[in-house]
Structures are given as C-alpha cells and as structure tokens.
C-alpha cells in the first residue's frame, strides 16, 4: 500500500491543447478516490500518467516516497484494470493472471500459488483453465481485477471498469469492488463518468473539468455543498435546476430572489452583502422541489412526466423561465397529470445561489 | 434440420458465371495432371486425352534422365521458399507492428515509400540485384534468391493492417503494465495473435518464392542449383519437347503447394478478411 501525490502535474501534446493543467492531488494510503468529470476532462489521461502509460509534461508523481520519472509501468507498483478488460485472448485465465509474475521471472509454483489465491478471493477458481472468449462480461471483469490483484500492487488504477457491463451486473460488481477495497485495504484510484459509481464507491471524489480539479470532497459533501455551479450540475441525477434570477434584497437571513415572473419571492440562505439587482443563479435539486396546489407555490404547468417506478420525474413550465423546472417526487405522492396546473415550493435550506462566475455564494 | 438454399434467377446467373470462370481457371491445372500420365504421342494426338493414363512413372523416368538434378532442384526450391517465408514473416511482422503501433517521425512518409515499391515492376530490380549479388560474390547461391526477398511491401502492409485492426492498444498497454518490454510485447502478445495474417503471408510468400522464375534465371548458373521452374523450363530447349515429362515434373512441383493450400485455405481467407471485418 502507498499514498499517491501529484505535484503540479501537467500534460500537453505537441501542437495541441493542454490536457491537464498544473494539477495537485494527494491520495492517502488505503483511500478510494474516484475521478469524475465529463468526456475529455482528462481523467483517463491522468490515470494513464499515474500508470506510466503517458509521459508527464511537467510536475511530479510520487507513489509512496518514490518519484516515478523514468520508471516503466511495471516498476511503479501499480496495477491497472482497463475499460475493455484487455485480457490476452490466446491465454487461459490462469495464464492471464499469472503473466506479470511470469515476466518478473518468478518460479512456476509460486505463480500458480499467487493465481490460486487471487482466484479464491474473486471466486473464479473454476474458470482458471478457460480462455477469455468463453467468459461472460462479469467473469471477464473479475479476471481483469484478479490479474491486478496477483501483482499485489501498492495502488490499483481502474479506468471505467464497469462501463461495458449491463445495469444489473454493474450494480453487483460495484458492490464487489467496495467489498474488495475493504478486504485488501489498498489505495485505489477509479475513473468513471457514472455518478452512482462515484457516489457509492469513493471515500473521496475528485471532480475534473477541462484538465483541472473543480472540487474534491466526500461524496455527500459534494452533493450537499458543491463549491461551484459545475460541480452542482455534475453531481446528482437528474441534475440540479439552475434558475437565472436577480437579488431583490439581502439581509442576515439570506438573499431574496424572484423566480421567473412569479409574484412570490424566495429567501435563500446566503451571506449578507448581496447587492439588489445583482444577477445570480438559483440552484435547486429536483428532489428538493415540492409540488403543491397552484395557489400555494409558484404556479407551473406539468409538461412531461417520467415514471421511474419508485419515483416520478416531472418537467414543469414556469412562466418567465426558458428551461423546464425538473421535479423528482415519490410516485406514491404524485397527484398531478400532464397538462395540469401545480404549485412549486422548494426546500429553501437546500437551495444554492451562484454568482456570475459560478461560485456558490451559499457556502459563505 | 437440413436447410435448403433457394437461389433466385440473378443468383443462378452469378453462380454459372463463377462456375465457368472456375472451370477456365482449373482447366490447365487439370490437364497438367492428365498429361503427366500420358506419352508425348497421346498428348499431341487430336483430340488430346481427357482422362488419366498409365504413363506417369515412364514420364518421371524421362524427366530424371533429362534433368539428373531434379530432386536437387526440388530441394533448392524448398530451401529457398522456406527461408524466404521465415525471413518475410519475421521482418514483415516487425515492420508491420512498428507501423501499426508506434508514433515516430516521418512514419507516414516511410510507409508511403514502402508501399510505393509495389508500383515498381520486379524486372526493374533485376539488373541492380544481379550487380549487388555479383559484388557480394553470392551468384549461384540460394542466398541470392532469399535475401532480396526477405521483406516485402505487401507483407508489411498486410501485417500493419491486421495488427492495427485486430490488436487493441489496451492489450499492448496491459502487456507493458505486466512488465513486457518492446520485444517481449511483440513476442508474447502480438505474435500469437497475428496467426491468421502470418498464415496468409506465409502462404503467399511460399507460393511466390516457389513459382519465382525470373530471379533464379538471372542469378543461378549451374543446373544443380536451379529451382524447379527453371529446371523444367530447361527441358523445353532440348530437341523434341517432352511434354509428358514436363507435366510430370510440374505435377510433382505443384503437389506441396496444393497440400499446403488445402490445409491452410481457411486460414488464408480468415487472414485476408479479418482486417476488413473488424476495421
């Protein structure tokens, strides 16, 4: 096991744009860190740089106390699980898992023993003599993880390992990965664009955007206290509603804003000192919006309802707003229909105000 | 359950065209085997024989009388074809791997130069090859045949296409993570996965080398160092042409190719189409 430090790490390609911009990150020994971000934000590149598959343009990567400049991937003490599993198709499962030890020159009995041990952990002993083509997606994924375990790395690197699995299998493997982390206690860095994976697996989430870190924190911290509009929009599903509005008044109790052409202003918790007329953006998660009768909240019209089983997601039209207001509500509590008139009320203590630069003003 | 394939009229016509084409192609081949079993008189009679006769052994005896080194010639052909194939597989797979996976300066230009050699007629290379072989003192030696053919543009192209379409980058990266150096990655991962392409290239190279007539004609001087096509050609210049003996010799010469082709034809087709299907 080892910690991981990224110090001023940069990556750019010749004649191309900068992919990673002066990035600093410390991952504690035994921590499970999830890197999330939109496509092209540099999360996979960062992982590949840690693995040694991409050169670092500037800065340093330290694994434990060891600087990694010039170290080939196999000597960094890391193991990577690829998105496509990258199992060698001409080798059996046992050969796949033991390949790194064979290359390291370990005697055959020792390799077999290590493979057996890892196979037991992942419950794939019965698959050891099969070729990858004879395995299901979930089994292949287990073998790919097994191949990583056999090396007994200081750090596990996962590059969207569950993205090729169907929803049910993904949920199962997610659970198994969490169990594996508890069992091994090894440092893990996990890249995904799936929020559920990020929220459920990570001790800490790092949100990347355009090659830099937007925010790092515990999953619930990012959900409840997003530092900026990007993180607020990226974490949570359906994504947070952003309603452009203007500050009407500001006091110790918060800022009063008006939504669309609604006659009912809302008072959002925010530090005092906001200037009346200041353009801001109100952020409210769909699950923090309540539906009431039209005379009680902001009047709105239900345009579309998506039934999800346990919950329903409704898209509302509010006069004066260009975009739909999205509401997530338990299906059992749904007493409305498409085309009907409703009232909208928000849990004000869960709302956020973002300034023009996207900074969350509600955090003070 | 047996499934019946019903062809529509268009498919029937296409089927017939292909069948006629196949007969035209196979005709000379068939008659070569038939004539190998008949005497010269039978072969030159009208109409010529269309079925096998009983003169094969006699024809082989004539062949061995006129070409006392025939078995030696067969050995030279084998030796040259096998070495040429081995060298081609080695160099073309390495070059194809490099072109498919590495990024280096002038990569595309170099590949274009390699490919452009396909446009040069082989005859143009005859004189320079002869001069170089004379300079090295390799004339009349098998190496004068296999060394100039050690790496072919077609082979480099075939291997490059196959590797870039059939071997994902992540597999090579996984090998690097597992401690493979460049050559170990090639040896343990790339080579075993390029079987179909290697089979195809091997077959093409072997056949090309086996059938090669022009280069041996220029570089081989002694009759015992002749390859089979050259030796058989020598028969035609010795008075009355012994067609039966020539056909017997040709049949013996073509037999190994036929066996290899029958055994490897499936792999050959797989190798030819794999890139197209996966690309």
Image (cartoon, coloured by chain):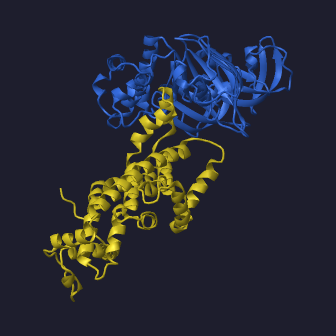
**Residue A213: x, y in percent?**
68, 23
Q: Is residue A255 above or below residue A194?
A: above
**Residue A278: x, y in percent?**
84, 26
Q: Quadrant of the N terminus of chain B?
A: bottom left
Q: Is residue A224 left or right of residue B17?
A: right
- Residue toward you, A364 or B109: B109
Residue B14: quadrant of the picture: bottom left
Count up the numbered dots.
0
- From where the camera sits, is residue A296 visible? no
- From where the camera sits, is residue B157 visible? yes
- Residue toward you, B221 or B257: B221
Residue A282: quadrant of the picture: top right
Q: Is residue B142 above or below residue B125?
A: above
Task: Kindly identify the residue that appears in the image at 72 percent across and 37 percent down.
Answer: A17
Residue A184: quadrant of the picture: top left
- Judging by colour alone, the chain drawn in yellow in this rendered image is B
Q: Is residue B15 left or right of residue B87?
A: left
Task: Kindly identify the residue that appears in the image at 29 percent across and 59 percent down.
Answer: B72
- Judging by colour alone, the chain drawn in blue in this rendered image is A
- Residue toward you, A71 or A31: A71
Q: Is residue B274 above or below residue B122?
A: above
**Residue A275: x, y in percent?**
86, 21
């Amino acid at each position: 096991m080892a910690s991981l430090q990224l110090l001023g790490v940069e990556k750019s390609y010749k004649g191309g744009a900068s992919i990673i911009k002066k990035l600093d990150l410390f991952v504690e020994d035994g921590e499970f860190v999830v890197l999330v971000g939109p496509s092209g934000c540099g999360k996979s590149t960062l992982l590949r740089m840690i693995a040694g598959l991409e050169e670092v343009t500037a800065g340093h990567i330290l694994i434990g106390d060891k600087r990694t400049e010039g170290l080939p991937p196999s000597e960094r003490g890391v193991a990577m699980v690829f998105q496509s599993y990258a199992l060698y198709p001409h080798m059996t499962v046992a050969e796949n898992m033991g390949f790194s030890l064979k290359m390291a020159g370990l005697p055959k009995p020792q390799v077999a023993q290590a493979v057996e041990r890892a196979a037991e952990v992942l419950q794939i002993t019965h698959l050891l003599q099969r070729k990858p083509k004879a395995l299901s997606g979930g089994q292949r994924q287990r073998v790919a993880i097994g191949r990583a375990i056999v090396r007994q790395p200081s750090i596990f690197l996962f590059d969207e390992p569950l993205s090729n699995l169907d929803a049910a299998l993904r949920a199962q493997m997610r659970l198994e990965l969490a169990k594996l982390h508890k069992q091994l206690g090894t440092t893990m860095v996990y890249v995904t664009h799936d929020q559920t994976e990020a929220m459920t697996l990570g001790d800490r989430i790092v949100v990347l955007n355009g090659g830099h870190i937007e925010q790092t924190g515990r999953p619930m911290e990012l959900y409840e206290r997003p530092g900026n509009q990007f993180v607020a929009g990226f974490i949570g599903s359906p994504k947070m509603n952003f309603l452009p509005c203007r500050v009407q008044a500001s006091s110790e109790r918060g800022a009063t804003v008006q939504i669309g052409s609604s006659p009912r202003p809302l008072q959002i918790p925010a530090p005092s000192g906001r200037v009346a007329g200041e353009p801001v953006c109100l952020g409210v998660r769909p699950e923090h919006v309540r539906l009431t009768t039209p005379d009680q909240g902001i009047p709105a019209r239900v345009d579309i309802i998506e039934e999800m089983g346990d919950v329903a997601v409704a898209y509302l039209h509010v006069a004066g707003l260009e975009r739909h207001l999205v509401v997530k509500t338990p299906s059992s509590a749904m007493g409305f229909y498409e085309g009907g008139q409703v009232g909208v009320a928000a849990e004000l203590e869960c709302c956020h105000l973002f300034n023009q630069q996207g900074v969350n003003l509600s955090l003070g | 359950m047996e499934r019946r394939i019903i062809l529509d009229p268009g498919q029937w016509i296409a089927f017939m065209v292909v069948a006629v084409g196949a007969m035209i192609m196979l005709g000379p081949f068939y008659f070569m085997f038939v004539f190998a079993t008949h005497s010269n008189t039978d072969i030159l009679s009208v109409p010529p024989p269309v079925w096998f006769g009983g003169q094969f052994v006699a024809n082989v005896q004539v062949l061995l009388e006129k070409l006392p080194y025939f078995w030696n010639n067969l050995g030279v052909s084998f030796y040259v074809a096998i070495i040429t194939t081995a060298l081609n597989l080695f160099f073309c797979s390495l070059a194809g791997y490099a072109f498919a996976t590495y990024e280096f300066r002038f990569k595309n230009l170099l590949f274009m130069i390699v490919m452009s050699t396909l446009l040069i007629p082989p005859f143009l290379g005859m004189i320079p090859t002869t001069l170089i072989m004379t300079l090295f003192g390799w004339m009349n030696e098998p190496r004068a045949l296999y060394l100039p053919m050690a790496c072919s543009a077609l082979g480099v192209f075939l291997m490059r296409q196959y590797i870039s379409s059939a071997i994902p980058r992540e597999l090579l990266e996984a090998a690097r993570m597992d401690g493979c150096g460049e050559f170990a990655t090639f040896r343990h991962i790339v080579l075993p996965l390029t079987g179909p392409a290697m089979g195809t290239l091997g077959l093409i190279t072997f056949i090309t080398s086996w059938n090669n007539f022009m280069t041996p004609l220029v570089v081989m001087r002694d009759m015992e160092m002749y390859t089979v096509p050259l030796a058989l050609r020598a028969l035609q210049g010795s008075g009355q042409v012994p067609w039966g003996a020539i056909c017997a010799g040709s049949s013996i010469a073509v037999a190994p190719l036929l066996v290899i082709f029958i055994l490897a034809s499936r792999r050959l087709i797989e190798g030819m189409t794999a890139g197209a299907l996966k690309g």
